[in-house]
Image (spheres, grey):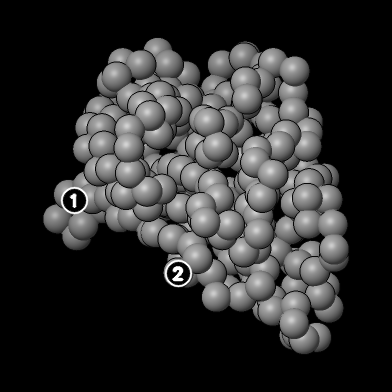
């Protein structure tokens, strides 16, 4: 996860902070041994809104399968969410999007539900990674053994304040060869002290370079989120592709700004 923040109450010197070092995020769908890769998310949070923009491309590893389009954004009542990474493995009964929908249907604050979701995913994801490690050792060693595996992002409005919960799951291999999972958590407003916070997931090098060149954020934040994903599409067209989806939650509720017709919401 990459992070860029600026306080627009004054003319700031923008900067980029890498929360953790990670390899390119993968949108991985493991179905009968045929995984896919690549994703880009741009998340912008202010006290008044959260905007999530995502690309729509899945690129298959191996074989002769053609790239295909997918929906990386969705909504549940007044909550918007994105799921990117190793999102589904039917052989292991693992479906991150289904887990999100199930947990969002239960009572609790967004943070409470994010913690429940984290525990649920952590157990299922560990089993899935263990199986992939056994059945697809080369894929696991190249893409999953040490680095980003899955991101889940949730956002809503409560008491006129934008709430954002992000969870990044990372695979780590201990010196003795034991597989471990590490979780990086972002919970806002607590972890978002500035007027505008921007987070990138997946392929983010080009977007973060662009952000670091800005003297301040533009007024059109949804346009910025879309532009950031488009920058990554131009930079890594083999891994990140159009169309760009954009969804926002703010004082007037959930609003799709750009959506593929096939995507739910």
On screen, residue 226 above or below 216: above
The one of 8 and 65 positioned closer to us in this rendering:
8
> Residue 75 appears at what percent x and percent y?
56, 31
Using residue 239 as the reference point, say whether residue 160 is left or right of it.
left
Q: Residue at x 69, y 15 (%)?
A: 262
> Residue 187, position in %: x, y?
44, 60
Image disc number at residue 190: 2
Foreground of the two, 214 or 21: 214
Contact (Cβ within 8 Å) of mark 1 with mark 2: no
Q: Which mark is residue 177?
A: 1
Q: Residue 230 appears in which quarter of the rendering? A: top right
Q: Which mark is residue 60?
A: none
Within-10-Å neighbours for mark 2: few <14, some 14–19, many 20+: few
Please state the horizontal and vertical placement of residue 83, each as a whole percent of the image.
51, 37
Position of 101 relative to 115 (above/below):
above
Where is 262 relative to 223, above or below? above
C-alpha separation, residue under disc 1 versus residue under disc 2: 36 Å
Q: Is residue 35 visible?
A: yes
- Which residue sits furthest front? 159
Q: Residue at x 74, y 47 (%)?
A: 229
Instruction: Residue at the far left: name it.
Output: 176
In the picture, the quarter occupied by the C terminus is top right
- Where residue 140 sits in the image (x, y, percent)? 37, 37
Q: How many marks?
A: 2
At a point 66% along the width and 21% down the height, the residue shown is 263
Where 261 falls versus 132 (above or below)? above
Callout 1 crowding tier (Cα within 10 Å): few <14, some 14–19, many ≥20 = few
Q: Secondary structure at mark 2?
A: loop
N-term mark: 1 or 2: 1
Foreground residue among 167 and 91? 167
């Amino acid at each position: 996860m990459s992070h860029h923040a600026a306080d627009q109450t004054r003319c700031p010197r923008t900067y980029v902070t890498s929360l953790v070092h990670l390899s390119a995020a993968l949108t991985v769908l493991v179905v009968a041994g045929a995984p896919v890769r690549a994703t880009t998310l741009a998340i912008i949070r202010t006290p008044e809104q959260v905007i999530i923009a995502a690309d729509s491309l899945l690129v298959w590893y191996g074989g002769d399968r053609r790239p295909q389009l997918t929906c990386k954004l969705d909504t549940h009542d007044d909550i918007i969410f994105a799921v990117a990474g190793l999102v589904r493995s039917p052989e292991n009964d693992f479906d991150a999007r289904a887990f999100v929908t199930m947990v969002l249907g239960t009572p609790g604050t967004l943070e409470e539900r994010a913690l429940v979701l984290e525990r649920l995913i952590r157990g299922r994801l560990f089993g899935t990674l263990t199986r992939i490690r056994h059945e697809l050792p080369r894929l696991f060693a190249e893409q999953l053994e040490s680095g980003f595996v899955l991101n889940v992002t949730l956002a809503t409005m409560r008491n006129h304040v934008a709430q954002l919960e992000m969870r990044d799951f990372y695979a780590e291999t201990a010196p003795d060869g034991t597989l471990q999972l590490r979780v990086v958590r972002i919970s806002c407003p607590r972890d978002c002290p500035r007027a505008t916070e921007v987070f990138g997931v997946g392929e983010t090098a080009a977007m973060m370079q662009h952000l670091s060149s800005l003297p301040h954020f533009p007024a059109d934040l949804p346009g910025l989120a879309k532009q950031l994903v488009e920058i990554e599409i131009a930079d890594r067209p083999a891994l990140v592709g159009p169309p760009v989806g954009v969804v926002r939650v703010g004082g007037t509720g959930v609003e799709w700004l750009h959506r593929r017709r096939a995507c739910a919401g």
